[in-house]
Amino acid sequence: MARGKKMVERVTQLMDEPKRIRNIGIVAHIDHGKTTLSDNLLAGAGMISEELAGKQLFMDSDEEEQARGITIDASNVSMVHEFEGNEYLINMIDTPGHVDFGGDVTRAMRAVDGAVVVVDAVEGTMPQTETVLRQALKEQVRPVLFVNKVDRLINELKVNETEMQIRLGKVIDKVNKLIRGMSEERYNEGWKLDAQSGNVAFGSALYKWAVSVPFMKKSNVSFRDVYQKCRDGDMKWLSKQSPLCSVVLDMVVHHLPDPLDAQKRRIGVIWRGDKESPEGKSMLNCDPNGPIALMVTDISFDPHAGEVATGRLFSGKLKRGLEVYVMGTAMKANRLQQVGIFMGPERVEVEELPAGNIAAVTGLRDAIVGSTVTNLKEMTSFESLKHYSEPVMTVAVEAKNMKDLPKLVEVLRQVGKEDPTVRVAINEETGEHLISGMGELHLEIITGRIKRDKGVEIVTSEPIVVYRETATQKAGPVEGKSPNRHNRFYVEISPLDPAIGDLIRNGDISMNMQEIDRRNVLMKAGMEKDEAKGIKDIQGSNIFIDMTKGVQYLNETMELILEGFHEAIAGGPLADEPVQNVKVKLVDVKLHEDAIHRGPAQVIPAVRAAIKAGLLIGNDSLMEPVQKIQINVPADQMGNATSQIQGRRGQVLDIVSEGDQIAVVGKAPVAELFGFAGDIRSATEGRAMWNTEFLGFEVVPSSLVKDVVLAIRKRKGLKLEFPRPEDYIG
């Protein structure tokens, strides 16, 4: 306990010196050794016993994580490391590698400035390595590389010393190729990974040793020693002479940026406000005396303290009792009740927490993940977090006992707050609660936690696939009349240009930007000036544009018109599924001069009906989620692997051979992938390793649309007939 107290004192002393802080994330593909690495870094920093490191899985504090041996939640810890005579505070987040929990990686990348990318020396870079690296670079998070499981190369693959170095070199080249492809500018600025410069380390997290070129000079341990000691099984010698903790944390301190340096580069990407404003200057300089600017990146529930919001503090200083506002809410002041930091599963209270640190606070009742928290009444919000995956599966959840229904509603609200990649909705017709998630495992974990942690007995349906709707042709102008016939709205519907859709998905344009900046980006992407100027709303990947000229009373009615737009795209006319990639243009409006005749009950239904009818005239079609699949099998099993993809309406995109292994890369609709795990195992005699990754939505083949639409309508209790435009604008 005394040791813990001393550690907290050292941590709090270093908080005030941004130059001595490193905020880092550990990222990798599943099973490449992130959590084992995190444990060993903690052991080296004196946080857990060395014997338990790698076995304790300190960062996997959830019992589900311990049982499955995977990380599900990103977890935070602060520790101290000494480098060249100075102490440094390292705030570290261990993130999940499974594709279903990619949302946690996205959120963690907003909180950190640097990332340790872990790659298995035997498997090399895998699909999820690419995804997490892309997320890091998108957030301007600088990577260093740790090549793990080097002992497996030597002892399992029996490579010789030269072959070992060639293979390790190939891993570095592959990661560099990814960095260069994703951000040539950063690559040329010195983000290239190079063993000689010291931003690459090699080792074995399980056996607690690592080497890097700079550390080799210090420790006199050479690659030859590494090879020899691994062959002899003398891992203890290696971990004594070249301890993993010292090598990796030295690399982190020396090569990853401190908050002062990082925020100068990152703020322009994650915040689109005025850089000359007091809050803009304060964030660029990581100023503890400036306005508070906190971005919430995680929300968890503490049985004693309630909601705990974790986030990165870019400016200002947090203290207990302080009143702050959550941007984009009703703007009631939230009072901070506790301010602290995470030391693994433990939360330690501190007196105050200055800019540049990762905070854990209670009292932010209005915050959700992605919220901007400040003590200013007005502030441009941080850019919203862009998740690379979208929910692709849904389960219906009901309370086993009716008396638990109010509790279930409360628990589902909490679930939606804790994990923004989960969508929770209530089907008014059937009274079912629908939870949408990233995949079968994601939904299994969430429903399991509702039963276990929240103590609500529930019954769940089989998972079903989430579809989208989109217009495939141009339609309009379509007239929408208000119920009292006094107001008319004319809209045109067309498919959104894919280039514009990509800008929205990548966060390059949003409603938070200055209008002129947004207009310039859109015009550069090929949008006409008048359209770019008239954008009134971006919702999901849909855009609403006002092209009218001089319509009286339009300004005061616009909010209601946008409400109608939101309702129309929340559930399209075909199957009440969300609409995406659609451009809605308001081309003319006739409004009653008396405000009483153009209230919400008149405007919203008219706009909603016009848009839904326009979608149907524009040949509204269903889109289904598609996943990329990579199957690694021995050469003699290649045929079985390809037939597993092709038999599921899939397509083989590439076949790559590496030694005696073949990697089959393909894509298939999520609807066809139920039961894939069992089938691929039996088809390949259990010798296949596979990964899936969200690839986006593709239009359902026209021969299948009618059956799928009617099946969804039946499930949702809608009329069992194909909808027509006249149903909306008769």
Image (cartoon, grey):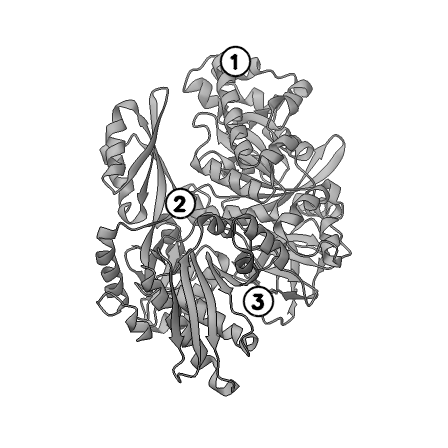
Find disc 1 in the rendering and name its residue: 228
Q: Is residue 573 above or below residue 263?
A: below
Q: Which residue sits furthest right? A: 289
**Picture quarter with the C terminus:** bottom left
Q: Quadrant of residue 660?
A: top left
Give the residue drawn at x 66%, y 22%. 214
Percent position of residue 479, x then y: 39, 73
Using the image as rendered, state which of residue 463 and residue 528 is in the foreground: 528
Find disc 2 in the rendering and name its residue: 694
Q: CA distance from mark 2 to mark 1?
A: 42 Å
**Dot 2: element:** strand
Q: Amino acid at mark 3?
A: Asp
Q: CA distance from mark 3 to mark 1?
A: 58 Å
Using the image as rendered, state which of residue 614 and residue 139 is in the foreground: 614
Q: Is residue 585 above or below residue 684?
A: below
**Dot 1: element:** helix
Give the residue drawn at x 32%, y 71%. 431
Give the residue drawn at x 54%, y 47%. 75
Sequence-first tag of 2 and 1: 1
Find disc 3 in the rendering and name its residue: 366
